[in-house]
RNA sequence: GCCGAAGUGGCGGAACCGGCAGACGCGACGGUCUCAAAAACCGUUGGGCUUUACGGCCCGUGUGGGUUCGAAUCCCACCUUCGGUACCA
């Protein structure tokens, strides 16, 4: 007796939903069967490339990775079930600063640190149960990958898109090294706290500005509008004019200014140069020299970050050079000032200042007591300082009376006729500085020879491998520069002793083409073959965080266009569709961080609830593009649902054979309505409502089973369909229950079910009856009932005369199948 | 400052193209089961008023206006929050 009870209890327990038992089992089976292996070509199937941004191997997977990747996986799986040959690869963005910092702290060699993290994170990624094709895994820090990163550098160099020029960098005088912007905190070195300076260094640049105009043209792409807008703002095209200004007392000199408002030129009351402007030294008067030099020195010491962070100081930091320039429009002299609100890196590094029509010029004029002259008539009710809007020109001689557009055109024509200026377009976008004075990156494949100059490493000698044995100690240069073995090399042209470039490439370079490599992993004859490129590119669906909205996505677009121009890839854009998920926050609604102690480790959630529950909960939380706090308590609701599903799918059902009964038709209706809803929800990336729909169908089936006998055909269709449409979201439990129901392995090889419209039709619909827009009652009518029928039904309501309140209907509005509104007076 | 997105129950959120606001969950409350608890299951749950009861009425989607037979949804003004950007001439 006792024994029997125990064995029953055990049987009961073993039949409970236990994710920790079924999930590893199925993952092992899928891996053994290569279920997610994606060949380049499958007979009768169209290729589709889905990709989610790859992680940096920091050591541990974050909830954010799950939040980004598991809905992406569901989307990829959905399309796979729709009959596409879907590639969904994964890899590691493995070069970068944290690995090198670990080495500087003496913890581990960057390579060992990275390799260990990659190994650990690969296992964590596998726990997601995603359909990643691990045969295509890439790792940007491996020689067989960065060999091709270097190859791309050479291609860009050969195309004239890579050039070497001087540029200011952040320099720490104590550590004697260059710092990345992220390493500069409040104008100080994050390591030693000393003030960071600006230094000019020779650096490699990619000429992304050559593509500015084409990159700006993103209107037609299927991307979130705000991301496209961010890119357009970042590129920052402005149209205007550039013209020369003569300098009093220096008849041989002139400087050029850029303006978007040449129509306001008659209002110029001073001119401003950037402190770094090359003419500063020559034009400064002797009387002003000490003051000017002090000012220039002060700005040189300030980093760009510091200069830009001093919001309160706008217009307050400048100095008079003691010299005047001539406004060519009216031949009047105007004082030349230096001010740090003018940047050497934009336009010509000098401006004409029109305080009446420009806010910053206004502030500066006020601070330095310079004259202000309006050249555009503001509207009568205008109450402000500078007027930047449109209006008729005044005090402007031959421009008077003209409005902005016309006045600009006339001013530019005049400049061109005079031969002193011309129409000009400027971009905010700057060339992409890719040199990094660091070890843990792809070495730039160039050689410096005393007699032959700068020479590229021949392609057949790639990769230029990173030496493992280097010293990690702070000096002025990359640790690579300390390696004699690395630095010294024969010149590829004359074979005389020469020196290698010791800088490595920005890691954004590695991630600008990684998506190409997935299409052709391990190809040692090319970065990507034309066959692989045309099989997979461009990417059909890219997903990733909007923190990459500008840099990574813009660099990749640039890179792709350059590759297209080399005839390597098809199409003009790398990412046909892009979707950016929101950010998942800690339970307290703040960004998760170790110091705040609000980090939710995904491994813990998986251990406690299972991967499927965790996946579904992340999708159920809210709209995917919104993100939000991770509520640790809410997941129990999803867990209860999957448990209920398990019970419904594995319990005995009292079957009957009554396919035409109301109950059977109700089940069929619910089934097909859910198929339709879940299909459109997944296509719209509305995973939260897809989960809600799946819960509803589960509840419906649960209640139907409890209520008594169920039609066998309707039930079978309902259960199988429910598992099929659940499969992309929760791949393990759906596979397990699919098998237990006696279906063929694997559920992930099945086709997506089709919603039968005719099964979805309701027998009757309940129409709200409104009086003057307020709901008063309801009538039940067939879904195709016409206005007369619905109106007749309403008039037959027992409380009809109460609803009218003794008033006369003057109008009736009927929206078929939705509502009836009676307007009374 | 500028650009963008969003404000709906105690909480996360739902609502097609202007047509029954609050789907689906969490939490809470009540119940079944239990020696008890947990789990599980069932029920209730925007606020207010009213009815012995069935029910009925009013208010309600950040604030104030507007358009409309009808507004969470469209228009105008404002407030708040979040994200991006930062002297780009």
Image (spheres, coloured by chain):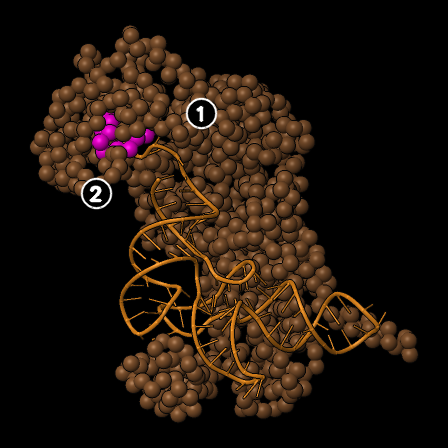
Q: Quadrant of the C terminus of chain A?
A: bottom left
The residue stretch that appears in magenta? A345-360
Residue A303 numbered mark, or none = 1
Image quadrant holding the N terminus of chain A, namely bottom right
Please tell me which residue lies in front, A445 or A628: A628
From where the camera sits, is residue A412 visible?
Answer: no
Residue shown at 8% from the left, 32% from the top: A398
Disc number at residue A446?
none
Q: Secondary structure at mark 2?
A: loop
Residue A434 is inside the magenta segment:
no
10 Å neighbourhood of mark 1: few (<14), some, or many (≥20)?
many
User: Residue visible at 35% across and 36% down?
Assistant: A429
Q: Determine if residue A751 is in view.
A: yes
Residue A68 spot, x, y in % from top left: 54, 53
Q: Colour of chain A?
A: brown
Residue A538 placement (x, y as % from top left): 42, 52
Magenta stretch, main secondary structure, is: loop
**Circle 1 sits in a helix, a strand or a loop, which is it?**
loop
Name the residue carrying label 2: A381
The chain drawn in orange is B
Vertical comparison of A72 with A485: above or below = below
**Which subunit holds the residue at mark 2?**
A
C-alpha gap between disc 2 and disc 1:
42 Å
Residue under mark 1: which chain is it in? A
> Can you give x and y, in whole percent of width and height, for residue A500 in the image?
50, 24
Q: Position of residue A132 (x, y in %)?
A: 57, 55
Residue closest to the far top: A286
**Splitting the image into 4 quarters, where does residue A653 fall?**
bottom right
């Amino acid at each position: 007796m006792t024994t029997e009870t125990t064995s029953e209890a055990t049987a009961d327990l073993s039949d409970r939903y236990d994710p920790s038992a079924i999930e590893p089992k199925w993952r092992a089976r899928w891996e053994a069967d290569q279920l997610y292996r994606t060949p380049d070509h499958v007979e009768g199937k169209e290729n589709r490339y889905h990709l989610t941004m790859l992680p940096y191997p920091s050591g541990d997977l974050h909830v954010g990775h799950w939040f980004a990747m598991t809905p992406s996986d569901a989307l990829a799986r959905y399309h796979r079930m729709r009959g596409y040959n879907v590639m969904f690869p994964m890899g590691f963005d493995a070069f970068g600063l944290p690995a090198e910092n670990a080495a500087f702290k003496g913890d581990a060699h960057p390579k060992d640190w990275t390799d260990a993290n990659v190994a650990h994170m690969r296992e964590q990624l596998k726990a997601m149960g995603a359909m990643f094709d691990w045969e295509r895994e890439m790792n940007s820090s491996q020689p067989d990958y960065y060999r091709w990163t270097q190859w791309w550098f050479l291609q860009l160099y050969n195309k004239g898109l890579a050039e070497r020029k001087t540029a200011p960098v952040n320099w720490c005088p104590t550590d004697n090294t260059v710092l990345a912007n992220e390493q500069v905190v409040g104008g100080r070195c994050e390591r030693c706290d000393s003030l960071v300076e600006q230094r000019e260094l020779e650096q490699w640049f990619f000429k992304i500005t050559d593509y500015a105009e084409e990159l700006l043209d993103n209107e037609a792409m299927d991307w979130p509008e705000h991301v496209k807008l961010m890119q357009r703002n970042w590129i920052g095209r402005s149209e205007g004019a550039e013209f020369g200004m003569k300098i009093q007392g220096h008849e041989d000199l002139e400087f050029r200014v850029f303006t978007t408002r040449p129509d306001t030129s008659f209002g110029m009351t001073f001119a401003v140069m950037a402190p770094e402007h090359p003419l500063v030294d020559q034009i400064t008067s002797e009387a002003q020299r000490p003051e000017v030099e002090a000012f220039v020195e002060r700005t040189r010491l300030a980093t760009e970050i510091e200069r830009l962070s001093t919001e309160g100081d706008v217009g307050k930091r400048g100095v008079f050079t003691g010299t005047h320039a001539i406004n060519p429009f009216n031949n009047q002299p105007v004082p030349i000032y230096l001010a740090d609100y003018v940047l050497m890196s934009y336009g010509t590094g000098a401006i004409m200042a029109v305080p009446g029509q420009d806010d910053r010029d206004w502030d500066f004029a006020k601070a330095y007591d310079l004259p202000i002259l309006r050249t555009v008539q503001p509207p009568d009710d205008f109450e402000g300082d500078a007027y930047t809007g449109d209006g008729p020109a005044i005090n402007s001689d031959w421009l008077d009376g003209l409005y902005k557009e016309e006045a600009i055109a006339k001013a530019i024509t005049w400049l061109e006729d005079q031969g002193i200026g011309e129409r000009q377009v400027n971009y905010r976008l700057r060339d992409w500085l890719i040199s990094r004075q660091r070890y843990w990156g792809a070495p730039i494949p160039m050689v410096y020879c005393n007699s032959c100059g700068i020479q590229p490493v021949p392609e057949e000698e790639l990769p230029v491998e990173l030496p493992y044995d280097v010293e990690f100690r702070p000096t002025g240069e990359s640790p690579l520069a300390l390696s004699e073995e690395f630095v010294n090399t024969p010149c590829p042209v004359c074979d005389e002793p020469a020196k290698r470039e010791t800088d490595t490439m920005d890691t954004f370079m590695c991630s600008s083409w990684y998506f190409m490599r997935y299409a052709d992993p391990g190809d040692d004859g090319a970065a990507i073959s034309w066959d692989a490129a045309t099989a997979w590119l461009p990417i059909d669906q890219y997903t990733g965080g909007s923190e990459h909205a500008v840099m990574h996505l813009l660099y990749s677009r640039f890179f792709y266009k350059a590759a297209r121009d080399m005839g390597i890839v098809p199409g003009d854009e790398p990412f046909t569709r892009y979707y950016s998920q929101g950010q998942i926050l800690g339970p307290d609604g703040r960004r998760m961080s170790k110091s705040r102690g609000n980090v939710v480790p995904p491994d813990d959630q998986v251990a406690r609830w299972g991967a499927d529950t965790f996946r579904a909960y992340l999708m159920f939380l809210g709209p995917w593009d919104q993100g939000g706090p991770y509520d640790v308590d809410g997941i129990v609701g999803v867990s209860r649902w999957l448990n209920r599903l398990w019970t419904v799918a594995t319990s005995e059902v009292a079957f009957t054979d009554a396919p035409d009964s109301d109950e059977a038709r109700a089940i069929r209706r619910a089934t097909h309505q859910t198929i339709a809803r879940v299909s459109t929800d997944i296509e719209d990336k509305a995973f939260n409502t897809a989960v809600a729909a799946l819960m509803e169908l589960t509840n419906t089936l649960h209640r139907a089973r409890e209520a008594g006998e169920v039609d066998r055909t309707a039930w079978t269709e309902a259960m199988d369909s429910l598992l099929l449409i659940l499969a992309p979201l929760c791949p393990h439990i759906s596979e397990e229950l699919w098998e237990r129901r006696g279906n063929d392995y694997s559920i992930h090889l099945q086709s997506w079910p089709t919603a039968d419209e005719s099964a979805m039709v309701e027998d009757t619909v309940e129409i709200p009856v409104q009086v003057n827009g307020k709901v008063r009652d309801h009538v039940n009518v067939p879904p195709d009932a016409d206005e007369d029928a619905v109106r007749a039904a309403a008039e037959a309501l027992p409380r009809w005369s109460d609803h009218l309140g003794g008033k006369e209907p003057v109008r009736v509005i009927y929206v078929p199948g939705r509502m009836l509104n009676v307007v009374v007076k």
